[in-house]
Image (spheres, rainbow, N blue to C red):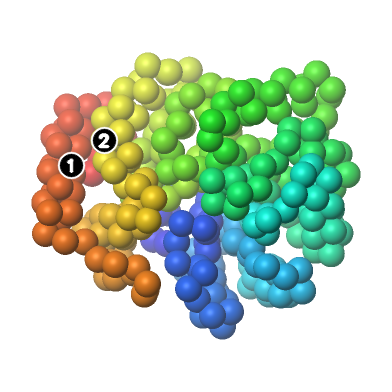
Amino acid sequence: MEFYVGHGVHGVTLLGIMGEAPKLTEAEGLAFVGRALKRLGGRIPAVIGVSAAGFTSLAAFARKVMDLGGAGVMVAPTPGLKGDRGVYDYYAQLLTLLGSDIPVVLQDYPQSSGVYLDVEVFHRLVDAFPQLVMLKHEDAPGLAKLSRIRAESAAQKRRRVSILIGNGGLYYMQELQRGADGAMTGYAYPEMLVEVHRRFAAGDLDGAEDLYDVHLPLLKHEQQPGFGLLIRKEILRRRGAMASATVRAPGGQLLADDLAELDRLIQRLERRLAGQPSSRAVA
């Protein structure tokens, strides 16, 4: 937590999908959230992932993490939902159960859940449930979807919901230009995500893209399905954010060739960052 706060992030997400939340018992998850929130001490908000197969366990866990000091909860749809009505009914029931006092982030990540969120369904949920305050946009391809949400919301004078992007930041620059408010993802150089957003918000599109381009080789390497968590944890270990890069079984490990590739990518990144004297995002 000190690592992320020190690199200027505006908030954190705990127990997200790419991490090891599914490998934790409920007691471990609560202990982890409690420890992290205590360390943060209210300096920045924390959204807690609470996705679960059943409503009863999900709602109970959500209330526990909110009592610990969470700023809100993030929920992905249960796999297997069919059709727009199925998706709407799922979230309508869940949001009603959670109640109006728990802010909710809807995670739209069909590559993982297998569930597609239609724009009209999202609009209906926004209109019906004020506690739905954010969309974590991870659909791919999803740029047209993002543009449509923003355009239709503005045309219909719908309340504005925050949209933060995921997918490791693979499409970050384009998504910012389509109306995203920032990133909600775990790239191991979070200061890049922060600085790119700062430059973009200041109107310096070229500067934002230049810095993003420097990081892109490592960013895409880190985003490999089934492998990226190993890389991300190893980078975070090297950067002093954690003491161990071990991934809980089943998880695998990095081999000699993997480590050599990572060495080279990091070395190239550091050399290129050294050539950007105006950048706040340094290794």
Mark linked to residue 217: 2
* Residue 145 x/y as whole percent: 64, 28
Residue drawn at (42%, 18%), measured in percent from left and top?
Answer: 204
Amino acid of disc 1: Leu
The residue that disc 1 covers is 265
Which tag, 2 or 1, sits closer to the chain's start? 2
Say if residue 126 shows up in the picture.
no
* Label 1, residues with CA under 10 Å away: few <14, some 14-19, many ≥20: some
User: In the image, residue 124 lies at what x, y percent?
Assistant: 84, 38
Q: Is residue 12 left or right of residue 86?
A: left
Image quadrant containing the N terminus: bottom left
Q: Residue 257, how many percent across, how many down?
A: 12, 54
Amino acid beneath label 2: Pro
**Coordinates of residue 172 in the picture (x, y in percent):** 46, 32
Q: Characterize the local packing of mark 2: few (<14), some (14-19) or many (20 or more) Cα atoms within 10 angstroms.
A: some
Q: Quadrant of the C terminus?
A: top left
Question: Which residue does the image show at 57% across and 31% down from the upper left?
Answer: 142
Whether label 2 touches label 1, CB < 8 Å: yes
- Front-lying residue, 107 or 134: 107
Q: Is residue 78 left or right of residue 7?
A: right
Q: Is residue 29 above or below residue 195?
A: below
| Residue at 30% in and 59% down | 230
Looking at the picture, tell me which residue is in the foreground, 129 or 115: 115
Q: Is residue 134 left or right of residue 244?
A: right
Residue 208 appears in the figure: yes
